């Protein structure tokens, strides 16, 4: 298994290699796209906050990363009329001229057009294509694509059933959950991530405390530990199971994140991968992750687990104490539309570690 790290410019490549990255993915908008298609997305993330700035910088990324492969996203869920031929031409340029190893694709018209050009062996199926069962997997295998990225919300048993032979498989392991199943979510974050803003006491309230707390964890708890680690969804304890399944790639999420956050996340994944390769059990990996990252309370009762069924024999918790309905963290952060600070009680005590809020929970901006 290899650690797949996000990028947004060439300056991030070497620090992430040092942290343990073995593959990279990033997005780039074709020249002249905005003039032709306005604000239509080329890839899932915001091109200004998450995109590589230019083709020249993409060339530098490929050169600096070598021999590690670089994958480029063309994975918007839909495109305007006339866009697919231009994206096919641009995708071929990325592969044949720039040196990108593969394209990450979601939309079917673009996927089939690229396959018609003989590019299937250099295509990865995005999680937005929602490959959730062995029938869908067999369809993508019949096209001749190289890899399928599995959606976030699949259980380990669903992954085991879906991961048929003849394909590489990629799974999410760190950061940035999604409230909805993004592959069948027809919404947009253009006006803000209302899926996260729908909260207790808000305009679209009527959510119970458990669901409110779960959404908070999907948005990386709006904070990080004083050691620089994000408190987002985590699947590192499932690595031994993924190794037995033959999973190829472990995806760290967050192209638009700071380099410090990316590097910390890759380092944490590298700790877990090293332990897995040495035969460690999920409980051993959990202990090492908590020792490195902090925030043990958020590992109790699988609060941050991408794959909570890794604990099918019992959810991790300290002692025999009952699970809290939502753990309590008091964090002092700037209130919305005010320079003054306000205190939000969100669940989870802080003990030996400190939490550094990056954003008030009412202004969450996690990306699906």
Image (cartoon, rainbow, N blue to C red):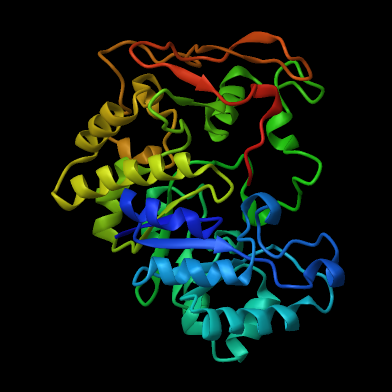
Instruction: Tell me residue 68's x, y (percent).
Output: 36, 68
Using the rendered view, name the quadrant where residue 353 is placed: top left
Query: Which residue is found at the position 70% from the left and 62% from the top?
Result: 77
**Which residue is more in the foreground, 212 or 197?**
197
Query: Which residue is found at the position 49% from the left and 62% from the top?
Result: 25
Using the rendered view, name the quadrant where residue 297 is placed: top left
Instruction: Tell me residue 322's x, y (percent).
Output: 37, 12
User: Quick check: 39 left or right of 151?
Assistant: right
Q: Is residue 144 visible?
A: no
**Which residue is more in the foreground, 83 or 135?**
83
Q: How many marks?
A: 0
User: Quick check: 145 left or right of 268?
Assistant: right
User: Quick check: 364 left or right of 347?
Assistant: right
Instruction: Tell me residue 301's x, y (percent).
Output: 38, 24
**Which residue is more in the foreground, 89 or 155?**
89
Instruction: Tell me residue 95's x, y (percent).
Output: 53, 81
Query: Which residue is found at the position 46% from the left and 78% from the top?
Result: 141
Q: Is residue 87 visible?
A: yes
> Would you place residue 266 above or below residue 140 in this image?
above
The N terminus appears in which quarter of the rendering? bottom left
**Which residue is more in the foreground, 153 or 85?**
85
Query: Which residue is found at the position 33% from the left and 12% from the top?
Result: 352
> Would you place residue 247 above or below residue 269 in this image?
below
> Would you place residue 347 above or below residue 107 in this image?
above
């Amino acid at each position: 298994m290899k650690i797949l790290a996000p990028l947004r410019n060439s300056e991030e490549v070497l620090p992430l290699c040092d942290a343990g990255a073995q593959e990279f993915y990033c997005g780039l908008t074709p020249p002249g796209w905005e003039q032709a298609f306005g604000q239509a997305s080329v890839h899932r993330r915001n091109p200004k906050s998450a995109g590589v700035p230019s083709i020249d910088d993409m060339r530098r990324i490929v050169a600096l990363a070598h021999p590690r492969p670089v994958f480029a996203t063309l994975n918007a869920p839909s495109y305007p009329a006339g866009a697919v031929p231009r994206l096919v031409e641009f995708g071929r340029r990325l592969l044949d001229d720039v040196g990108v190893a593969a394209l990450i694709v979601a939309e079917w018209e673009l996927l089939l057009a690229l396959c018609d050009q003989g590019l299937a062996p250099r295509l990865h199926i995005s999680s937005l294509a929602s490959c959730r069962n062995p029938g869908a997997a067999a369809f993508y295998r019949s096209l001749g694509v190289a890899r399928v990225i599995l959606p976030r919300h699949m259980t380990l048993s669903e992954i085991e059933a879906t991961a048929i032979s003849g394909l590489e498989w990629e799974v999410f392991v760190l950061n940035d959950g999604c409230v909805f199943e993004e592959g069948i979510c027809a919404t947009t974050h253009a006006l803000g991530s209302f899926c996260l803003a729908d909260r207790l006491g808000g305009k679209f309230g009527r959510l119970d405390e458990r669901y409110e707390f779960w959404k908070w964890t999907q948005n990386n708890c709006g904070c990080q530990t004083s050691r620089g680690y994000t408190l987002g969804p985590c699947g590192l304890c499932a690595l031994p199971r993924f190794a037995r399944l033959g999973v190829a790639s472990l995806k760290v999420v967050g192209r638009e994140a700071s380099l410090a956050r990316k590097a910390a996340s890759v380092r944490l994944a590298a700790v877990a991968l090293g332990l897995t390769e040495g035969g460690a059990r999920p409980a051993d990996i959990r202990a090492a992750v908590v020792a490195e990252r902090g925030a043990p309370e958020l590992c109790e009762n699988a609060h941050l687990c991408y794959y909570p069924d890794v604990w099918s024999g019992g959810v991790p918790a300290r002692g025999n104490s009952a699970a809290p309905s939502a753990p309590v963290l008091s964090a002092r952060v700037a209130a919305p539309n005010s320079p003054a600070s306000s205190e939000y009680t969100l669940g989870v005590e802080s003990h030996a570690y400190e939490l550094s809020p990056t954003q008030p929970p009412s202004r969450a901006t996690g990306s699906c």
